Image: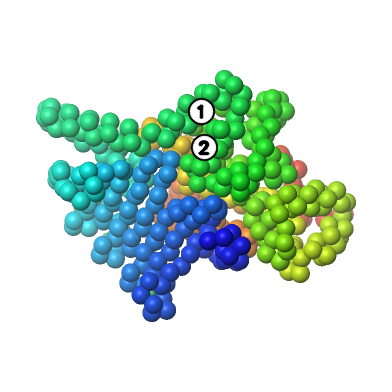
Amino acid sequence: MSPLAWADKVLLSKEFKYKGYGLHFDTNNNGQPDLEEYYSLSDVLLGKEFDNNEDGKPEKSIDYFKIRNVIIYTLDTNNDESTDEIIFELGDRAYHVIDQNNDNSYDEFRIYSDPKGRNTLIYSEDIAFPKDNDGTIYFVIDFLKYAEEKAHQNMDAALRRFYKKELEHWNVVTLAKYRELETLFQEAKRTKKWELLLDKTREYLSYPSNTFIPITIELKTHEEMGGALGRTGYASILQFCPEDFTTLQDWLSTADHELMHFVQGYRAFLMMKTNLVMTWNEFLELKKIILLTTTMEQAEEILKNLSEDKKRAYLALNYILTEQNYKLLCEMEAYFSTAWRFETYFTEFNEEELEQFSGTQYIEALAHLTLWSNMNGKCAEFFSHALHDIVELLQSMKRNSPEEFEDLTRVVNQEAERLKQLYHIKTPSEAQPK
Ligand SMILES: [Ca+2]
Ligand SMILES: [Ca+2]
Ligand SMILES: [Ca+2]
Ligand SMILES: [Ca+2]
């Protein structure tokens, strides 16, 4: 599908996910959607959701994790809104964990494999494994380590060897692309040429390639970056200090965050483009011209001549002038989307480290959201999906653990206060003339 054909859908639908677009299908032609597919901006299939009984809630989902070579199937076979089977498919092998009696604990582990498919059962064992980490890439690692430890306690050397081998197999397959990036990362540090690493990072994290959104790298010193790990300029330049990245993990999480900002710029381009024949380079030129204006009226005047759709032009203008309202939401979305994908950046299953990383991302996302709402926030429409997800997350947290929610609120408010000073933001009451 050409970008123009779906541009309208991407920008107007509430369903588009952060950096791509979703398509609805009605496979049995009864007027009710029963399948959704999610694609990246560069048309890479990211996931599917099946709603066969058409009650609006998916009972089967498929997620494709390119960087890990893994496809994860999550199934709710009895429609009670609780997962009862997960399948991890990698190459010609598939790991199944099944909860037969819906008691919130998995009781069967199966491995399927054969050279041509994943349909021949080669191993099966009764287990009792809780449903924590459900659906994340670490679930299998977590389980295999637990099973190996249990075999060790039971002094079953053969079973222990078996689980050890399975863990090795899992690591070899799921970390192959990560190792490739690791090599490129070391190479980039040595040669100071970061283009190849950025290209591969974009490919493996399902971001549009350079032919879609051209990005130029500008290397800076630590001082020039002034505390930031990455920065985007004119929607076409990525600035960072190579010495700031000690591990590939640091690079990947920063790249994910900054690439999200490029996608946000691209969305503004698409909004202008729907009513206008415009190339990406023309858009960047226009952006430079608009940035040279001194008042909002002058900027609007330039846009008025270009776009008939005032609302879209206004939204694009907010992006171009990086209005504070818009900028806060851009940051909110980038932190939030990185928090969702943290599992692709960490090779080791280290619960503490993982929690700390995602926790920090969520706190930053929420602090930006808080600041935005304190400023009588605008531009919400553009971020409806992220806002919807964040509200849902907070509501479930408030329900499940009020104490933790209170702690979080406190930390978020502190961080919002810090950011307010950093960005020199004045809330509407403070900004009012005396
Ligand atoms: Ca249907
Ligand atoms: Ca359903
Ligand atoms: Ca179920
Ligand atoms: Ca069970």
**Residue occupying image coordinates x 30% and y 46%:** 89
- Is 411 situated left or right of 404 in this image? right
Residue shown at the point (46%, 67%) measured from the top left = 24
The residue at 66%/34% (across/down) is 217
Residue 306 in sight:
yes
Ligand 3 falls in quadrant? bottom left
x, y percent for residue 160: 17, 30
Residue 373, can we see it?
A: no
* Mark 1 residue crowding within 10 angstroms, few (<14) / some (14–19) / many (20+): many
Residue 81's image quarter?
bottom left
In-image side of 399 versus 144 (left or right):
right
Query: Ligand 2 near label 2 (Cβ, under 8 Å)?
Result: no
Would you place residue 432 above or below residue 190 in this image?
A: below
- Which residue position is annotated with label 1? 184
In the rendered structure, are the residues bearing label 2 and label 1 in contact, judged by CB atoms less than 8 Å apart? yes
Which mark is first along the chain, 1 or 2? 1
Where residue 365 sits: x, y (%)? Answer: 57, 47
Q: Nearer the viewer, residue 89 or 137?
A: 89
Q: For this rendering, which residue is in front, 113 or 150?
A: 113
Residue type for callout 1: Leu
Check disc 2 and give the amino acid type: Lys
Left or right: residue 184 versus residue 130 is right
Q: What residue is shown at x 69% (from left), y 61% (from top)?
A: 273
Q: Residues within 10 Å of mark 2 (few under 14, many from 20)?
A: some
Q: Which residue is mark 2?
A: 200
Q: Is residue 85 above or below residue 251?
A: below
Label 1 SS: helix
Q: Nearer the viewer, residue 193 or 315?
A: 193
